[in-house]
Amino acid sequence: MIGYIIHFLAKISASRFRKSAEGGLDTQKALLNRIIKQNAETEYGKRYGFSKINTIAEYQAALPLVSYEDIRPEIERMTAGESNILTAEAPVMFAQTSGTTGKAKFIPVTPSCQRAASSDMMRAWMYHAKRAHPDLYAGKIVSLVSPAIEGYTESGLSFGSTSGHIYRQMPGIVQKIYAIPYEVFEIEDYESKYYALMRFALSEKVSLLATANPSSILKMCEKADEYGQLLIDDIRQGTLNNKFKMAAELRQALEAKIEPNPNRAAFLQQQHDKRDGRLLPGDYWPELALIGCWKGGTVGHYLDKFPSWFDPDGNTPKQIRDWGFLSSEARCSVPLSDRGCAGPLALDVNFYEFVQADDVLNAPNDPSQWNFITIDGLKTGGEYYIFLTTTGGLYRYDINDVITVEGFYKNAPKIRFLRKGRGMTNITGEKLSVNQVIDAVQKASISSGVLAEHFKAEAYTEESRYLLRLELVGHHEDEQLAAFVRAFDDALREINVEYEAKRKSQRLHMPLLHVMRDGWYERARKAQVAEGKRMFQAKTELLSPIKAETTLIKPELVKELDINIQ
């Protein structure tokens, strides 16, 4: 019955989403006009003459592009309780995410951000998923979110996860179809959180598994396997194991929701024994109809590991549907098919501008040289930087993401995330910036006494870690180098809240250190010149989203230091 109610509501939302896509640029114009008029009397609106703006061209001429750092002073005033700064609406919370400097970003979430248009996006995803997978609601939903409240601003408003906020506020009738009580996500210790998550998830037949990051799904599977017999015993006895730490009030709330389930335990024991002590989701969730998560970008490689967990015998591969292009700043696309990763943009939720990636590459620090286009100027196969205007007070916001276009749904472009843009990497959601790497190297040098003549950090995606290459000043013993790596990791954890979260949840591992031969940096520059680049174009790249080829690096490598295995 609950599934029918959800599907009925989702059908209505999917219809609205289709109509907004049919409207194309007209939908975008109407949204931009509404945002401008609603916020014309704000401090920001008066500064840039919102009341005089009537067209997209006038909007682009009047307002500058902004990064978060450009509007940080305004947002800090909003977190302090000032009103009518960026939006006429008062924010109801702030979404917290990592910034390019040492300070976290606080993204305002207004009532308009939470209303029908944004809700329609998730419901439209569910509607099309149900049409393709009729058994989507045959079991429970396992969805992983971050805590709704991670702290409070100076004015008393909460900051945290928007997904957690939505999960926490779901009506009671809807919550019944979800397997995991919200209290699980408030457990601070990650080992305990994974245990509790799987303590509830394993107790249920599950037909939909949904969370943005596939690395979270893999970690969940690994922990269920690691604690297999303990979990089975707890499900049989109706207990929440005291081995795992959690606040007393959370434990009490969770224990009130469990009871002995010997039949389910017997089934799990059978699956556990037939695999010689392994506990695999392909066995304990045979009803699983669909997995929803990111499939592309820098996290797509995690899906290569899914078959060994969800289809261990190679008989029934699980279908996976991309979760869409979304961030703390905005949710933007809704994939409507299991094929590929692309989804049409929600044209009535955010206003979008684009610049061809080559334009930014040729003049990375000079937006006056960029040609800004709207959705009607996009071409299938093109690669573009995307800029957002939201109902939460972000105007012409540079999110520093590169997308590609894979056709159209009605008059809405179907986009796929490719990579972070200038000076950033992102293995599993940490969004690390070159400034953060520089800061961390400096702090590690002071702490350990190890000085770097030159350095470069590379995203070692296959091992979910960063590889730091150092050309040293002087000689240092392994103990001192190990201290440097630990201090570097500690500094990144302090600087970047997302990096800290991924390290705590074990989705990112300790950085790997490569000590390079004297002169490595200069030889690399000369190699660039030999390839045809002018000397001034041979750039010093301190952070790369791609690990260098082993065959190219090996002659330059003195030693490798892996703290993970020490």
Image (tube, rainbow, N blue to C red):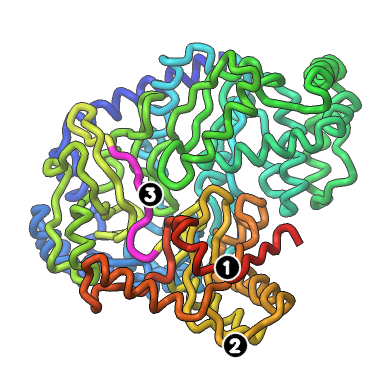
Left or right of residue 225, residue 325 in this image? left
Q: Residue at x 56, y 13 (%)?
A: 1
Residue placed under numbered mark 2 in the picture:
474
User: How far from the left and from the top, in percent, is residue 466?
Assistant: 55, 60
Q: Is residue 418 magenta?
A: yes
- The correct choice, above or below, for 177 with respect to 385 in the image is above
Mark linked to residue 330: 3
Left or right of residue 137, residue 454 in this image? left
Mark linked to residue 367: none
Label 1 SS? strand
| Magenta stretch, overall SS | strand
Q: Amino acid at mark 1?
A: His
- The correct choice, above or below, for 327 with respect to 268 in the image is below
Along the line of sight, the residue nearer the viewer: 306 or 157: 306
User: Label 3: how many residues lie within 10 Å, few (<14), some (14-19) or many (20+)?
Assistant: many
Q: CA distance from mark 2 to mark 1?
A: 15 Å
Q: Which residues are magenta?
A: 415-423
Residue at the outermost front position: 555
